[in-house]
Image (tube, rainbow, N blue to C red):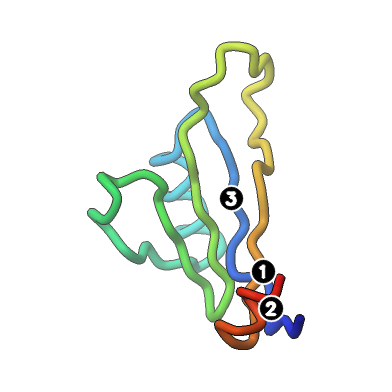
Amino acid sequence: MRLEQIDHIAITCQAPDAAKDWYIRVLGFEHVYAGRWGGIPIFLRLGSTYLALFPAQDARQSSSAPRLEHFALRAATKSDFLEA
């Protein structure tokens, strides 16, 4: 399987809107796909780097710190994806 890059990184956070504002204001990300999927996740982009911000819904999450839930890799072609 040939990979091109990391497609996106998904982060769970207590306050996704506040996190979105921080990534935009401090790091220069832009909000993309606004309104899709009912607003969840919030997708941000900086160049070819994407972040997906999900709200924390697990009561067992004892920390207010963000958690990395997953990262997604982008296959070079659809056949590479299907091969995997």
Q: Which mark is residue 49?
A: none
Q: Name the quadrant of the N terminus.
A: bottom right
Secondary structure of residue under mark 3? strand
Q: Which residue is mark 2?
A: 5
Query: What amino acid does circle 2 point to?
Result: Gln
Lower position in the chain sequence, tag 3 or tag 1: 3
Q: Are marks 3 and 2 in contact (CB under 8 Å)?
A: no
Q: Residue furthest front?
A: 83
At 67% from the left edge and 14% from the top edge, which residue is drawn? Answer: 62
How busy is the neighbourhood of tag 3: few (under 14 within 10 Å), some, or many (20 plus)?
some
Image: 7 above or below 76? above
Residue shown at the point (52%, 73%) measured from the top left: 46
User: In the picture shown, does residue 38 fall above or below 61?
Assistant: below
Mark 1: which secondary structure?
A: strand
Q: Are marks 2 and 1 in contact (CB under 8 Å)?
A: yes
> Which quarter of the rendered picture does the C terminus lie within?
bottom right
- As measured in the structure, the alpha-carbon distance from the residue carrying label 2 to the one carrying label 1 is 6 Å
Labels 2 and 1: the sequence-earlier one: 2
Q: Which mark is residue 10?
A: 3
Residue 2, percent across and down? 75, 85
